[in-house]
Image (cartoon, coloured by chain):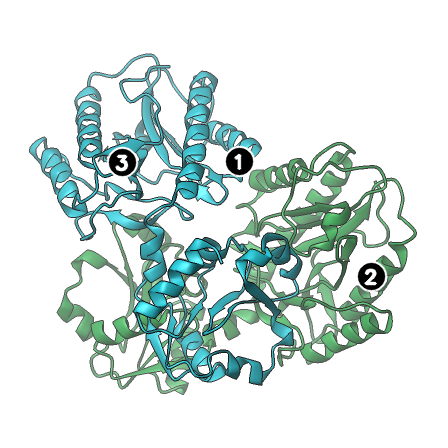
Chain colours: A cyan, B green
Amino acid sequence: MNSKLQWLRNKMSSLDLQGIIISNPINIKYLTNIDAEGTLLLTRKENIYITDGRYIEQVHTILTLFDEIIVYDVKDISKDDYENFFMFCENVGFEENYITYAQYKEYIRKYKINNFVETENIIEKQRMIKDEEEISNIRKASEITDNCFSYILTYIKPGMTEKQIADEIDEYFKQRTEGLAFETIVASGENTSKPHAVPTDRKIQEKDIITIDMGCKINGYCSDMTRTFFVGEVPEYVRPVYNLVLKNQIQTGESYKDGASTRQLTKLVENDFKLNGYDLIHSIGHGVGLQIHEAPYISYRSDAMLRENMVVTNEPGIYIPGKFGVRIEDTAQITKFGCINLTKSEKNYIII
Amino acid sequence: MNSKLQWLRNKMSSLDLQGIIISNPINIKYLTNIDAEGTLLLTRKENIYITDGRYIEQVHTILTLFDEIIVYDVKDISKDDYENFFMFCENVGFEENYITYAQYKEYIRKYKINNFVETENIIEKQRMIKDEEEISNIRKASEITDNCFSYILTYIKPGMTEKQIADEIDEYFKQRTEGLAFETIVASGENTSKPHAVPTDRKIQEKDIITIDMGCKINGYCSDMTRTFFVGEVPEYVRPVYNLVLKNQIQTGESYKDGASTRQLTKLVENDFKLNGYDLIHSIGHGVGLQIHEAPYISYRSDAMLRENMVVTNEPGIYIPGKFGVRIEDTAQITKFGCINLTKSEKNYIII
């Protein structure tokens, strides 16, 4: 059995769960590497994956004997089979933040479950801490993101549209990776004032400010990087904002380490922005893994602590509505004594 | 108030619901045309949409006074406001097939709900029957899908990869529509044996069999079409399978009409496949609308009847593991006396 399933079995026994039903496909991929539609059951004796005819073949190409997972085609499972899976299980766990109310009722009926127990995101919490292989995937995705950024700086010319640049980035990623980690953001001029800008037909002009937020996927794992840069020169009115964002991005990176409080990290940035007359309008970071946004969230609504081998973004930004915005973002691995940026592109003024 | 919200209010009163919470964004888009993150409440007196700062501006550009929807920013709503929304409501409906078990518990607490009632997909059921405007959107999306297919037949040449062909389809749709209805499938050679194949770097060869499954979106509404075709010639061993699939696809189309039983339609195909030594491994169709897969599902697990102005796919397929597969799919509008195919591409042997 792989180490992640083994971890879950240990966790179950510490929680007095004799069985568990995993329905969230991201959690199933995390635990088993299976990327399909189906349900994972850990019963007293067995690990069972239930899927349907569309995926049986594909699932068998992923699993080996070592995985110790029995694959069922849903159409071969009888009413009795369902009732037997969790026989003699006092407590069976479920993902209360994933399954619907209707599924909850249906599972209890179908599996004849005695005591169906909320599991409070145990798998999502474990997913926050990455193992060496997971970090290696994110590192590769980050390297390709850096390379893509270097390339795109040479590609962009005044007259090109934001969409054209986004397409070029997408193509770069599609040729080298499993694809985009999220929809690429290319914003120029006043469009940079929208944190979630969608690429438009606006053409790049001389003296423009440009923000690009991009990432790709390797073996399911994401990268995430943002840079704000300039055409020809850095406008005087942008300099103080850029400097303030960069200063905070660097200071935050210096504070990222095992034990740091996400709320306090956020407060520090917010206070410095406020002192200079600006608001912090989004969280300063989030976990990155099989999902582009996952726990922990680094905001003042969160009470998480950073822990060794979390991989999180560091992305303060300032946005002046209708005028311009600046965001600088790295993906970083947390260590005991600091953090290691996995994205390494230049952060001082970049002029193309 | 628009006709869809008016319909829902009438439905609520027939179900003795004094309030309802709509959380599924697709249902919210269907009822209000709002395409954002938020929650729609129908209370005794008002229609309320709760969203956050990211969407307020966009939502206001969509709504008019005629809609009679009051928009709240979630950060302006107090604990008392939440408790007042459904005051004096005996029964409040919720979408048991959309909200998680955790949300269900949270809603009851936050809104102080007396009797929280499962609404058994009332909106999804209504969405099955399309009005003229919805059909017109699907018809447009289907036309562009046909055009894309004609174009792609001239584009494909031996030596190209499946990914390259999928990218060209994606680009065609992106330039002419709101984008893809789902991830385009381009499968060639033995990859056609996987119903949900993902495009690979496999290169198209002489005498290849190719399956393409694709669709786009117009005003949120999807199209869905599959064709299986050939490079140079139709291999002898494929002919009986292709002919059997096509025969069943045509016969199914001839049986699609108001009152037809989805289970019986499926049985007919399954029996004919079995008689010839093949299995039916997926349902033969599904509804198409704001979602690419929606009710009704045409399978033997479903007991639905086709009804006038449903829009559904007709897509029997046979898959021989490790060898090849054939699927032929149209999107069709159900009428009183038959069905109208909205996708109209050639179905007899297509050779490029």
Q: Which residue appears at 33% of the width and 66% of the height?
A: B40
Looking at the rendered structure, whether the residues under marks 3 and 1 are on a common chain is answered as yes
Is residue A294 depicted above or below A109 in this figure? above
Query: Helix, strand, or loop for circle 1?
Result: loop
Give the camera-side residue of B212 and B289. B212
Kind of residue sitting beneath label 3: Glu
**Spot occupied by residue B274 in the image (x, y as percentages of width and height):** 82, 73
Q: Which residue is mark 3?
A: A315
- Choose mark 2 or mark 1, whichever is in front: 1
Is residue B16 depicted above or below B242 in this figure? below
**Spot occupied by residue A1 in the image (x, y as percentages of width and height):** 49, 58
The answer to whether B175 appears left or right of B263 in the picture is left
Q: Which residue is mark 1?
A: A177
Q: Which residue is mark 2?
A: B246
Give the camera-side residue of B252 and A273. A273
- Dot 2, how many residues are within 10 Å of its Cα: few (below 14), some (14-19), or many (20+)? many
- Choose mark 3 or mark 1, whichever is in front: 1
- Dot 3, how many residues are within 10 Å of its Cα: few (below 14), some (14-19), or many (20+)? many
Q: Which residue appears at 23% of the width and 77% of the height?
A: B86
Q: Is residue B155 visible?
A: yes
The answer to which quarter of the image holds residue A189 is top left
The answer to which quarter of the image holds residue A134 is top left
Q: Which residue appears at 27% of the width and 19% of the height?
A: A348
Kind of residue sitting beneath label 2: Leu
N-term mark: 3 or 1 = 1
